[in-house]
Amino acid sequence: MNPYILATLLFGLGLGTTITFASSHWLLAWMGLEMNTLAIIPIMAHLHHPRAVEATTKYFLTQATAAAMLLFASTTNAWLTGQWDIQQMSHPLPVTMITLALALKIGLAPVHSWLPEVLQGLDLTTGLILSTWQKLAPFALLLQICPTNSTLLTMLGLTSTLVGGWGGLNQTQLRKILAYSSIAHLGWMILILQFSPSLTLLALFTYLIMTFSTFLVFKLNKSTNINALAISWAKAPALTSLTPLILLSLGGLPPLTGFMPKWLILQELTKQELPATATLAALTALLSLYFYLRLSYAMTLTMSPNNLTGTTPWRLPSAQLTLPLALTTTSTLTLLPLTPAITAALNL
């Protein structure tokens, strides 16, 4: 893609998210989301591969549906209450509709089916943008309306953690596994949204760091399925030894960074006298942990050519920048001791 065009599209992507962040009016927020969608579509389709075009079409249709639903809900809110302000949502009908529209936008279960399919059709860089940056604007709106319909949010959260764990069990494609991982993490964030928005923000922040490092590792290895992971020790031995720790951090094991949001969320749910919800969420995390362990096993405990039919690739030096990978990996592995400082800063 022409660098000028790419720069323009990335600027549009950033501007759309920033407009949604800065807006207090539903029409402006909707416009930011639309700019965001329209800017990423050419980036998704730039490979001109049938799968990429199919993924782009699916993404466009789901995002357009969610945006239309959002616009309809905000118009309904203006009709019922006479105002367009985002933070003054008082009527339960538009709040529920907007929550569902934003759930479709970010890919929460049960409206998640598009996410694994779309992510599978994209290259790892675009997949990274879709899994991280594209979640920010809808989350900004969710945090602003702070829906009070606790049953809906709990159901969305638990269904997402369950589907995110269950769906990833049988996958061999890394991008689909990361999509299901994303659904499960978003479920944890939605689960705690009504009780502690700052905790949702913390969970989102740690999810972004961990997902960033995972995508960069796979991109450095040029791996798109589990079999390709088994030969990564020949390319980058040091990174191969660190990757299982990154994956286990995504799974939420102590003493890694990924344990912090899960621990605080379970603690908060118990404080709110929801032990059954907390237990169910913790049990669904085990499902996710299984497929992270599976990836770790394939990467570090199996030796090519014993387990696959592919050929060992050339050990060519990668042109990828290693500083972002180093920073995100360090953050993914070592931020747990900062938990007291973070909880104090966020007033948790």
Image (cartoon, rainbow, N blue to C red):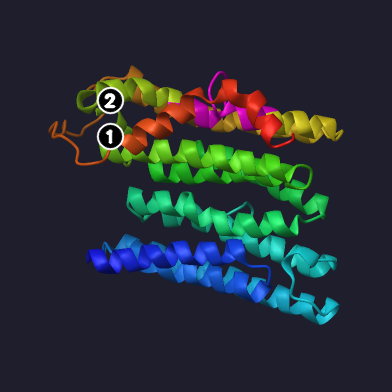
Residue 259 shown in magenta: yes
Residue 79 placement: quadrant: bottom right
Q: Residue at x 64, y 44 (%)?
A: 201
User: Can you tell which of label 1 and label 2 is closer to the viewer?
Assistant: 1
The picture places residue 138, in percent across and down from the top left corner, at 60, 59
Q: Which mark is residue 169?
A: none
Residue 343 placement: quadrant: top right
Give the answer, above or below, for where 62 lies relative to 314.
Answer: below
Q: Which mark is residue 228?
A: 1
In this view, the residue in front, 60 or 287, is 60
User: Are there few (<14), some (14-19), or many (20+) residues within 10 Å of tag 2?
Assistant: few
Q: Quadrant of the N terminus?
A: bottom left
In this view, the residue in front, 299 or 318, is 318
Report whether residue 170 is seen. no
Q: Earlier in the sequence, mark 1 or mark 2?
A: 1
Q: Which mark is residue 307?
A: 2
The picture places residue 257, in percent across and down from the top left corner, at 54, 27
| CB-based contact (under 8 Å), mark 1 and mark 2 | no
Residue 25 placement: quadrant: bottom right
Q: Secondary structure at mark 2?
A: loop
Q: Secondary structure at mark 1?
A: helix
Give the answer, above or below, for where 136 lies relative to 93.
Answer: above
Question: 80 left or right of 167?
Answer: right
The picture places residue 162, in percent across and down from the top left corner, at 64, 40
Residue 38 shown in magenta: no
Give the answer, above or below, for where 107 lies relative to 157.
Answer: below
Q: Residue at x 81, y 50 (%)?
A: 151
Q: Quadrant of the C terminus?
A: top right
Q: Which residues are magenta?
A: 246-263
